[in-house]
Amino acid sequence: MKRQLCTLVILAVLAGACGGGGGSGSPSGSTAATVGADGISAGTITDALGTFEETQAFDQLSQQNGKGKARRLFEQGYLSRLIRREVLQTRADALGVTVPAADVADQLDQIKAQFGDDEQKFEDALEQQGLTASLLKRFVEDQVLEQELRTKVAEDQGPPEEELRAFYEDHKGDYQEVRASHILLKSGQADAKKQADRLYSQLQDAPDSKVDALFASLAKEFSQDGSAAQGGDLGWADPAGYVEPFGEAIKALEIGKVSRPVETEFGFHIIKVEGRRAQSYDAVKDQIAAEVGGVSPEQVWQDWIIEAYKDAEIEVNPRYGELDLQTQQIVDATAEDVPGAEESPAE
């Protein structure tokens, strides 16, 4: 549990969760970037980097990349986040989009819940990343604002909600998911096909009332993937997400029946279908929007955010690199622009 929060906090730091702007005008030695008339001071980046260098997160990043590149990655990620905050907040103000306090509180509660009732462990984890509870809250507010804007953009530019729901109700049968179990014998194993045939015969010879228990038992003993511990249970999934021979076998199987060994690139599978159901509307909403509207909600959002960045009149101090509009990240103009590139990760 603790690992999940630490990962989130590291991402918060690298994404520039804390800090503000300051200054104005075109980028100069004291300005890292300008967004319209607003400036982001170079001192803000420097101060944040100094704090980051005292954390375990910096040590971890340095071990992987070297200290020079770790500093560069932080500066670019931090500046990218501050620019994004300026761009999104300006658009949110224009659209009347606000951050629901209840949503922020809910996400913070989920993070804190990873530590149970131990407030000290939570505070220690933040300190190790160079953050405070207030700075983490600001990062979560950024996330929630972006989620709210995504919803607004989808509503304004995508097919109407009523149209999507009507399409879903009319085509529920096209959005099925299946719960399946399998026993996998990897093809690299000697006599994998013979063993698969033997297990299949054993299941065929068992009374119907014993098949479920026997299948789970054989999966735990013989299956060679992570589902073995769960008796081969793969959970609920869209059959289209499986490799083709496996997915086709699932579609053809009746509930409770066991397949003959099915060969895929992973080996030989004995498959049993446990159940079928329609996927929820929320799970397939984006897919339906792409089918009905001809473009995915993610593409709609990416087109919108790129235009927002273009309209924001952003200038970046070349000392930090340049803005890549497609990813909205500050990147190096050339490989030679990377300080510390000659370092080994251990330095």
Image: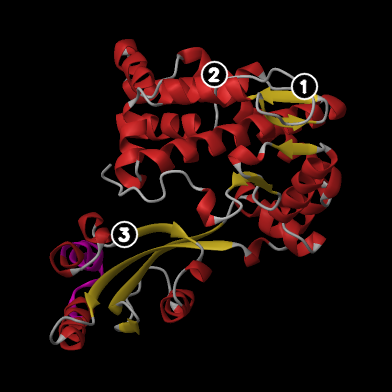
In this picture, which residue range is highlighted in magenta? 205-217
- Residue 246 sits inside the magenta stretch: no
Q: Which residue is mark 2?
A: 137
Name the amino acid type tagged 1: Ser
Left of 327 or right of it: where is 197?
A: left
Question: Residue placed at 26% from the left, 59% from the top?
Answer: 226
Q: Nearer the viewer, mark 2 or mark 3?
A: 2
Q: CA distance from mark 2 to mark 3?
A: 38 Å
Task: Judge left or right: residue 50 versus residue 39.
Answer: left
Main secondary structure type of the part rendered in magenta: helix
Mark 3 belongs to which amino acid? Asp
Say which label, 2 or 1, has the lower sequence index.
1
Decide if residue 1 is in sight here.
Answer: no
Q: What SS does tag 3 mark?
A: strand
Q: Upstream in the sequence, badge 2 or badge 3?
A: 2
What residue does disc 1 label?
24
Q: Specify whether 33 is left or right of 206.
A: right
Q: Amino acid at mark 2?
A: Lys
Position of the C terminus, as image quadrant, is top left
Q: Residue at x 29, y 42 (%)?
A: 63
Provide the secondary structure element on which disc 1 rests.
Answer: loop
Give me the residue at 48% from left, 40% from top: 73
- The residue wearing badge 3 is 233
Q: Given contact means CB atoms under 8 Å apart, are the residues at marks 2 and 3 in contact?
A: no
When the figure is inspected, residue 12 is found, relative to residue 51, above or below; the finding is below
**Gap between marks 2 and 1, in whole Å?**
26 Å
Distance from Cα at disc 1 to Cα at disc 3: 58 Å
At horizontal 31% and vertical 37% (from top left) the residue drawn is: 60
Tell me which corner region of the image, top left, top right, bottom left or bottom right, holds residue 190.
Answer: bottom left
